[in-house]
Image (tube, grey):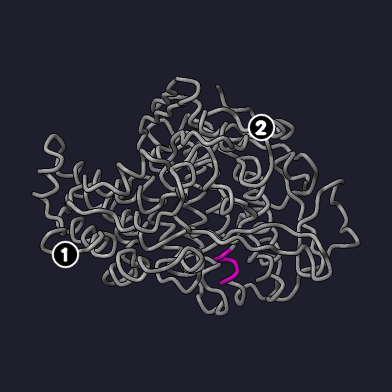
Amino acid sequence: MNSIINKIGICVSLTGMLTLASCKKFLETEPDNRTTVTTPQQISQLVANAYPKASYIAFCEAMSDNAEDKGSAFSSLLNSQSYNFQDVETIDYDTPEFYWAACYEAISQANQALEVIEKSANKESLKAQKGEALVARAYAHFMLVNLFSKVYDANAAQNPGIPYVTVPEKVVNGQYERKTVKYVYEMIEKDLTEGMPLIQDALYENAPKFHFNTAAVHAFAARFYLYKKEYDKVVAHAKAAVSGDFSSNLRPWNTTYSSLQYADLQAIYSSASENANIMLQEAMSIWGRSYPGNRFGLGEVIASTLLYSFQNPTGGRFAIGKNMYGSSPQSYNVPKFREHFVYTSATANVGNPYNTIPLFTVEEVLFNKVEANCYLGKYDEAVTDLNAWVSRNIEGYNSGAHNLTIQKIRNYYPTLSTADAIIKTALEFKRATFIHEGMRWFDMQRLKMTVKHTLKKEGKVITIGPDDNRRVLQLPTTATLSGLELNPR
């Protein structure tokens, strides 16, 4: 395991086409196996690696209310400890510590690229690479702060953040400080707004959805400003990310998808050819093979109350439920990921399992826009966008029977305000949409929803309230080598 697992600092070793190597000494001189980055192509390759090649899904999904005790005999340590809100003790694929390491590896790549660009005599011709590096750095820090720190709120100026690293590391175990959540958000916004106008879609014509293309940057900005509660900006960036009508770009769960077999749905869901996918990432992960069998996940209760139920303001049933597989509640799953194997080199006979995961989608942009418009009092616009989702996601869709109106939503949630009723509707639609993808946990965090996890065999219920310290992931204990204080428990 790379030494980045044991600390925050990163070294970048460029062997052939730029691979990461562990840091074992001060890098005051260039190691023999380190290639000097000079050409635009090399810089582009460096920036292309500035994305976390790891997944947050497994632990986020297990912590959310999209997981229940299915009573299965098997449960990985990761799955069990995440569901029980215990510190995860393993550092293997899909764990918090693995994700922490991958994010700082990505940040290191971005910082290395930015340093090379800054020293280049042709900085003007490298604007696109600079833009992507800045936005990629912002994204990795954004994910870290929303997992390993408290949510952005009125206490953001007091709550500890995560180290915002802006220069390549020159020594092993360099000392860092966490500063505050507010500071981290300020730095994210600085990188995001500086990098956004520099993005050029033509830079990566062969694989645009695996990079921060123009649409993806705006989708990221819409998410960022929703967390920051700047709703005008959410709507503006959502419109920039997805222009025109949403419905033609949403996943067709109630038409094309409904007739797909398991392997076919796996293949299309996370593919670049799917219009709903704005940005994708290859992540070292075994999630695609593990989530159907884990003890804690999608089971009978969630399936019957969320995916199979008519109990929602449309009066219809979510079509995604028709694509649920499994011979029993212990193996229920919706196929979304197809694992592939990547060899460590062209001549190696060993490698790593990967899943391709959607980082930004048209569906998320829609839901973020709906929520923002509700806070802005633009209820008609919010309902119009929700009906775009309804048209693609309700089984046997009929516009007259299933389309929403403000009054229809209010009648379903009579005790809620108009804004809260529409937002609650959107959040339930979103919850079903992103089943198995970990997205629900981020909504539960930022909205401080209470989580209740039942343990059938043990006969107890774990209740995690809005201010419970266990909602925040623990930093790797070895991060203390870099001077960081662990989160309270």
Instruction: Classify 10 Å Cα crowding around label 2: few (below 14), some (14-19), many (20 and above).
Output: few
Q: Secondary structure at mark 1?
A: loop
Check disc 1 and report the residue beneath it. Answer: 398
Q: Residue at x 26, y 46 (%)?
A: 309
Horizontal and vertical percent for residue 105?
68, 52
Decide if residue 471 is on the left or right side of residue 140: left
Q: Mark 1, mark 2: which one is toward the viewer?
A: 1
Horizontal and vertical percent for residue 306?
31, 45
Instruction: Identify whether 365 is placed above or below 151.
Output: below
Amino acid marked by disc 2:
Glu
Marks 1,2: beta carbons within 8 A: no
Q: Which mark is residue 245?
A: none
Decide if residue 374 is on the left or right side of residue 326: left
Residue 271 part of the magenta segment:
no
Q: Which of the 4 image quarters holds residue 398?
A: bottom left
Which residues fall within the magenta stretch? 128-132
Amino acid marked by disc 1:
Asn
Decide if residue 153 is on the left or right side of residue 380: right
Horizontal and vertical percent for residue 2?
77, 48
- For the C terminus, the quadrant is top right
Check disc 2 and report the residue beneath it. Answer: 89
Q: Which of the 4 image quarters holds residue 244?
A: bottom left
Instruction: Identify whether 275 is placed above or below 179.
Output: below
Q: Is residue 245 visible?
A: yes
Query: Magenta-highlighted stretch: main secondary structure?
Result: helix
